[in-house]
Image: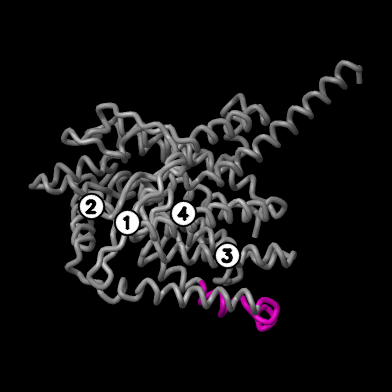
Amino acid sequence: MSPNQSAKDETGFLLFAQNHKIENILFFLILLFLPTQLGRHFWPSFSYISGIRIDYLSPTVYLTDVLILLLLIFFISRLKLRSPLLIFKKFPWFSLNLLFLIFIFLIGILISKNPGAGFYGLLKFLEFVFLGIYTARFVTKINFKKILLVFSIPIIFESLLSFTQYLRQSSIGGIFYFFGERTFNGQTPGIANASLDGELILRAYGTFSHPNVLGGYLVLAMTLILFNLKIIKNKLEKFFYFICLAVGTLGLFLTFSRIALLLWLSILVIFIVFRIGGNFFKKNAFPIFIFIVLIIFFIFYTSLLLRFSILSFSDESFSQRSELFRSSLAIIKKHLLFGTGLNNFLLEFSLSQKTDKIIFYLQPVHNIFLLAAAQAGILGFIYFIYFLSKTFQRIFKKGNLANYKVIVFLSVLILGSFDHYFLTIQQGQLLLSFIFGLMWSKND
């Protein structure tokens, strides 16, 4: 080998290693800033419905989008994927299925009433597909502990911010605005309040777009940590994660999200029954005791039980969701084959109403399965169910329901059955992409 060739190979190797290191940093930054909403909104004509700006349709460049774009650039340059044929050769089954799904989306978009919003939705879909694929390649036993640490930081940050919002009954403002916190108080129109003993209490938002999104994030992030505590050998580190879980649980209570709270309590029961032995309690008696005391104190201090005991079918939130549910079924029936087109549900929903009052709470149906069927049609919905079934087959090994991947996967399905943020909001879409990538990773 000539000296020139040897120097060239060494330079190429150093560039490969440097790009890989940068990718690692970018990926961890994406996870770290996942809860943030820092971004620049744009308002083209397709982002309006009846002259009203719709956040769901606004093309937005978030900080996390910039990080994903940089990750894609370094990933391509490192692997030198100059030809799409290389991807097809390496992942033929996945590539063909993805192409066919994109073809279905394109037909739905082209025949939709709002193609601009549809093409923007397709672009975001491809972005999150890449993030999911990269996650599946990235997550290994070596870096999984780092991922847990990266998730623990936002858990503590969001929970402490939520606690402060709860005490003030308003947003904090200042530098927190740049993390994504919006300006609000208990009297802000459309704000999420909880009625406790006849008094309206502002639900904690953190830096998320809604308390339910914050609740879903905390449940999934804490589940990852809870079921992987056994890989943490250092006692000081393990104590830190116990504190993280305790603080995160208190933050979850402040969201007053019924589904998220019930789900987290169910996960704790599953963990205690299937994954904990007597030795665990003996070795960690003090942090567990503090954890339980804090939970019990906070439940009674906030009168949280009232949040569940006064649930009624006459609640405004229940009636609105019921109306969205009925309307989504009508939309699915009307656009059975290819759906309304991506990002076109809200427009179809607005056209199906007989009164302008619906504009005040114009939002997607609170169910990812109905939303997928309405926007992608029966063909896209079949692909969605097929992908979910293949994912479950991959993670459900030896009948172990206490596998952390199974718990996280089922938690996503439960949360998605009562809300839409996994398919409509940047933070939820990022979280869903990471979760599915984690499901397909080799780390068990």
Q: Distance between the residues labelled 1 and 3?
A: 24 Å
The crowd level at tag 4 (other Cα within 10 Å; few <14, some 14-19, many 20+) is many
Mark 1: which secondary structure? loop
Q: Which residue has dot 1 on it?
A: 367
Q: Between disc 4 and disc 3, whose residue precedes?
A: 4
| Magenta-highlighted residues | 268-284
Q: Position of residue 85 (x, y in %)?
A: 58, 29
Q: Between disc 1 and disc 3, whose residue precedes?
A: 1
The disc at residue 82 is none
Side (left or right) of 279 relative to 265: right
Q: Between disc 1 and disc 2, whose residue precedes?
A: 2
Q: Between disc 3 and disc 2, whose residue precedes?
A: 2
- Tell me the quadrant of the picture where the N terminus can be found: top right
Side (left or right) of 240 relative to 312: right
| Quarter residue 55 falls in | top left
The disc at residue 161 is 4
Residue flagged by tag 1: what amino acid is it? Asn
Of labels 4 and 1, the one closer to you: 4
Q: How far apart are marks 3 and 2 (CA)?
A: 33 Å
Mark 3: which secondary structure? helix
At x 63%, y 64%, the residue is 228
Residue flagged by tag 4: what amino acid is it? Leu
Confirm or deny contact between disc 1 and disc 2 (CB under 8 A).
yes
Q: Which residue has dot 3 on it?
A: 404
The crowd level at tag 1 (other Cα within 10 Å; few <14, some 14-19, many 20+) is many
Within the magenta stretch, is there residue 279? Answer: yes
